[in-house]
Image (tube, rainbow, N blue to C red):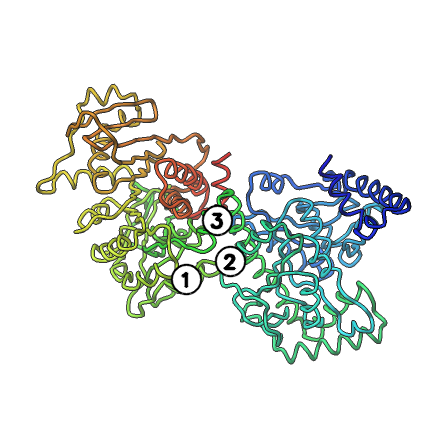
Amino acid sequence: MMRRLVAAYRVAWPRPLVQTGNRQAQCVLLTRLHSYVRSSTSSSRPARDLLEIKKEVQEALRLGRPVVALESTIISHGMPYPENLKTAVAVEDIVRSQGCTPATIAIIDGQIKVGLSEDDLETLARTGLKAEKTSRKDLALVLSQKKTGATTVSGTMLIAHMAGIKVFVTGGIGGVHRGAEESMDISADLTELGRTPVAVICAGVKSILDIGKTLEYLETQGVTVATYRSAEFPSFYSRSSGFKSPAVLQTTSECASLIFNNQRLGLQSGMVFACPIPEEHDMDGAAIEQAIQQALQQARDSSVQGKDVTPFLLDRVKKLTAGASLESNIALVKNNAHIGSQIARELSALASAGNSTPNLAVCSTQRPLIFGGSVMDISSKFDKASRRRSSENGVLMGTSSPGSVKQSLGGVGRNMAEACFRTGGHPVFVSVVGGDLAGQSIIRQMHDWGMDVDNISTEATQQTAVYSAFLDPAGEMLTAVADMKIHDSIPTHHIDSLIQRFKPGVVAFDGNLSVRSMEAVVSRCHDHSIPVLFEPTSIPKSTKVLELSIGGVEYATPNLGEVLAMGEFLSRRPGTSLAAPLKLKQLARSGMEILKAHPKLLPAILNVTRHIPKLAIKMGAGGVVVAVRDTHQSSEPSTQSKIVASSTHELEVHVGSERVQVVHIPVTKRLTKCVSVTGAGDSMVGTLITHLHRHPGGGVDVLLEGCRAGMAASLLSLQSTHAISEMLSPSVFSAVAR
């Protein structure tokens, strides 16, 4: 209370009054002091019970998952039915595909809703222009009269802020109308941006407005304005406007970092991120300007004013362009949803990283580096043939047969990169594809997700790696063909420039690289003191890393079969034997059930960790076993392995001056139904890479934290038809932390 009185004293007593010392001044002071304290002690925040927040939105906000706000005026006033409903559903689907939760905001029968049901969307789409266009000034009126209101950019920002949503996607923002020097028609969106800390992702200012004056007004309001990958500020239907952008950002992580730092500074202003319309939907500037001028004249002739101007002009422009402007409008909104969702996901990653400033700096300015294979996966499943003509497995051989064929993106390195990307790592992925349709499809899909594809090279004379599996009617594999020859061409010659440019906290590669390429990566990372992670990929490829003439790999993520193969390989190497084997009786007394179930595992761990000191071993339904070898002070130097501490899930082995810590992380959540196991391990490794990149130099605790988050990512993969679940997001870290 004393602090509040001191603050009130400073505000209420200007220096000239202090100096007069008369009774009148004292009365003025007391009056102002009373008024200030009363206003400061009363709550000026809106009651949260005014908001009806959809359950999935509420849960996402509670868990720190990324949420994207969407406005509703674009549904009611921006497009006719049923295009408006189709677009609204499609945009929400895009947001979900990026691992975010959509929250379309509107007022239905006097109730503010954050997140609309299918029935709400249908109602709003059919209501159309009859819905009240609702900005800040209209909210109380629409609520009190229990009307249905479609929120503008202004109204949506305000409600999103009340709900705790930081990112908002729309088509375009309002602005200063042409001729505003006479009409004083300036959108409330601009003043809202000056006082509400929500980031607005849009296609710039609607081209029916005065873009130059709008940018000037935003500057006056203290609003940060930036464009995404364009030096010119976009004008809604067109990528160009003739106005230079105040700032240019090249990645969604840069956008997220800007928002995050705006929050850390405590600035109460919004931000505008302008994303140019995709090139294939870019409208001719001269043609759209001609249509706008005709629409403006028709508006003047019809005496259209106030909030009716924008929907009138958009409708007229649509008719004058024979519907082309509507197609462009839909395309730009979908593009904004893609980019905005990626920004929201990156922002969530920054928030979930905690309050450690050094780690946040790593997230926003550095990027992990991943080398590996890109594959087009094809699975062909036979329909069941008639009993008279089929073989034992239900397949008629020797002829063509009906069935279903599915294509999907694969490759261990590519999967790792996608999982890293979806968990906020924003990796630099180095790979190679052929100059064929499969290669084009891989690059295009990854680019559409927002991934960096600049370092995926194309070998015009080679074919993209393909894995083609043939399944019987029950889904069991009959056989498969794997054409992976192109992976020998994965480039590593430019690793020095990549390290200098991106300063990775960790560099990872899969078993598809040649031994020569692996050696180049490990050597350069050793020179730069960068930790290296090896993902074995398969049992035959798991031992390639052990053939290197140099050490330097710090992490490996084998499965059970791979780590046993690596241990066996080392035991056969001339001059090398399995390091100081433990007696079976000693292992039986250890109490660690996972090691009892797999008696060859601990000897393999002890041998492999001599070469790769940190292991995260994927045990399938058995969870993950983490093993870390380091030095310790021993009063009894010995070459024999000795178990010095153990429990059900932890064990410590001393070998001379070294110790090996082994920790078992069991699966705690069982699935009732598994859709596909493909990509589950890669999901874990990609998530682990994100975590290691953010926490360089971490010990066993960091590895355990990353593996737990990785297991949550694997769980999502098991429930998805995709190798990497589209629901995977940075929230796996915060969920594990809780």
Q: Quadrant of the N terminus?
A: top right
Q: Nearer the viewer, residue 376 or 161?
A: 161
Q: Circle 3 sits on which residue?
A: 360
Task: Tell me the residue that label 1 is attached to.
Answer: 453
Against 606, is 303 above or below? below
Q: Relative to residue 697, is residue 596 drawn left or right?
A: left
In space, the residues marked 3 and 2 are separated at their CA atoms by 12 Å
Residue 540 x/y as whole percent: 21, 46
* Residue toward you, 170 or 214: 214
The residue beneath circle 2 is 254
Viewer-proximal residue among 298 and 35: 35
Q: Are marks 2 and 1 in contact (CB under 8 Å)?
A: no
Query: Up-down: is 108 above or below 300?
Result: above
In space, the residues marked 1 and 3 are separated at their CA atoms by 24 Å
Q: Nearer the viewer, mark 2 or mark 1?
A: 2
Q: CA distance from mark 2 to mark 1?
A: 17 Å
